[in-house]
Image (tube, grey):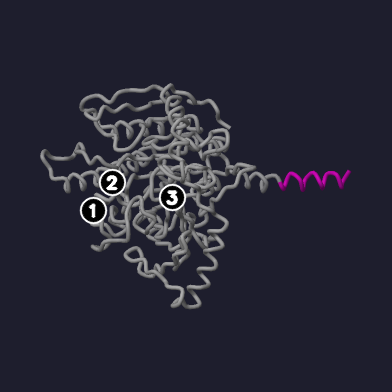
Amino acid sequence: MKKISLLALLALAALPAFAAAEKSPAQKPNIIFILSDDVGLGNVHCTGGHFNTPNIDSLAQGGTRFEYAYATPLCGPTRCLFLTGRYPFRTGLISNQSAGALEDHKEIMIPTVMKKAGYATACVGKWGQLPYGPGRWGFDEVMSCKGSGRYRHEQGIEYERNGAWKKLQKGEYLPDLMHDFIVSFIEKNKAKPFFLYYPIEAIHGPILRTPDSKKDESPARLYTDNVEYMDKLVGKLIAELDRLKLRENTLVIFSGDNGTASFGVEAAKVDGKAISGHKARLLEGGSRVPLVVNWPGTTPAGKVLKDLTDFSDFFGTFAELGGAQLPQGVQIDSHSFAAQIKGEKGTPRDWVYVELGGKSYARDARYKLTNKGALLDLKNAPFEEIPVAADTADAGALAAKKKLQAVLNEHPAGDASGIVKKNKKATKAGRQQSRRGVGKSEGLR
């Protein structure tokens, strides 16, 4: 009997330690991912741009900025990469024209994973170049519009609000309506953890006046207005978190879906200098984007990390922070950087992989190798990408090429031939289902 009692006491003593390994809802951080549109390094002041972005800069000053974050050079593949944690060649969404390749019975997106961990989920903003609607993929609440650059009544804008389609009225500014929807979502879910995906419309073209713009402003000034209004919306969101006393337990991440659009590159220089490439190009200016993480009391303030990250990594990072299980039976490419968010060393990547429309590259801290065999030295990036000739490559360059070639061998870029025609029908069907409100809460796995 004494032995049994002793064993019982030991078992009881072990219970608190076991329980501590499980995160209670109160311990799980709220997660807000702000994904700006066509915002490259030169569009944000803290990453070298000349624009006035005090609210994003404040997030960087109070948090950590990742200097080497890589997206796909176009919005559709980038968003799919983040939402699935899987590289384009695995999902089939390798370009903005291949949304029909994405099948909801084969892919699991991050909101479904977070819901199973007890999170309320919402998608507020752009849902372009992706099939069906956000509700079909696991978001509890949705306010979204199809395509890009949807702002004003004059554009004939329709938007979805929790399964119902509405027309934007005269005098309304869609980004402001979306901010109000976000505040409502947060207020309703402030007592439990929430995951908010905020694919903000700005600063995708057309570049129209903002509510703060003056009459008859020049195109250059309107572009600046849009950058500044995007930053203003970020500030308004942070102010709401403060008002609701949620800031200390909320991780806010700001990033861009690809580099600056071609019409903005002259204005969006980095430290006054032009960078290599822009949106839609597999160059630094197309795929290297701002990334700021801020979680007061947890994320080191004012830190700049040189760790490599790519957009697949958000999937595993959010799942780890929320105590969620990764999907089984599917290849996830994500490499969590949750430890770095907490100020720990973690296990940084040795390389990142970027793919678009049948072309791809892998890069490490110094070199980049394309799937066409070109080796480039990035010592002067993002301003210059220097070709390395085979007959002049030193031992370091040759070793890097061998390593990166192995990465490319394991990650074959998707075949772009005929994909537009192949997926037109599927894409059209998916959009029709979305417009009927299909999947508000159905099909969640």
Residue 117 in percent (x, y) is at 57, 38
Looking at the picture, tell me which residue is in the foreground, 26 or 3.
Answer: 26
| Amino acid, disc 1 | Phe
- How crowded is the residue under tag 2: few (<14 C-alpha within 10 Å), some, or many (20+)? many
Residue 71 in percent (x, y) is at 42, 51
Q: Is residue 29 left or right of residue 3?
A: left
Looking at the picture, tell me which residue is in the foreground, 276 or 315.
Answer: 276
Residue at 25% over, 51% down: 264
| Residue 424 sits above or below residue 58 on the image | above
Residue 278 in percent (x, y) is at 32, 54
Circle 3 or circle 1, nearest the eye: 3
Residue 222 in percent (x, y) is at 18, 44
Q: Is residue 193 left or right of residue 229?
A: right
| Amino acid, disc 2 | Asp
Quarter holding the C terminus is top right
Kind of element beneath mark 3:
strand
Circles 2 and 1 in contact, beta carbons < 8 Å: yes
Residue at 54% over, 50% down: 334
> Can you tell which mark lies on residue 231?
2
Kind of element beneath mark 2:
helix
Residue at 47% over, 31% down: 426
Q: CA distance from mark 3 to mark 1?
A: 29 Å
Q: Which picture quadrant has residue 428? A: top left
Comes first in the chain, label 3 or label 1: 1
| Residue 396 sits above or below residue 423 on the image | below
Circle 3 or circle 2, nearest the eye: 3
What residue is pinned by disc 1?
A: 51
| Residue 73 sits above or below residue 381 on the image | above
What residue is pinned by disc 3?
A: 356
Quarter holding the N terminus is top right
| Amino acid, disc 3 | Leu
Range covered by the magenta-colored residues = 1-14
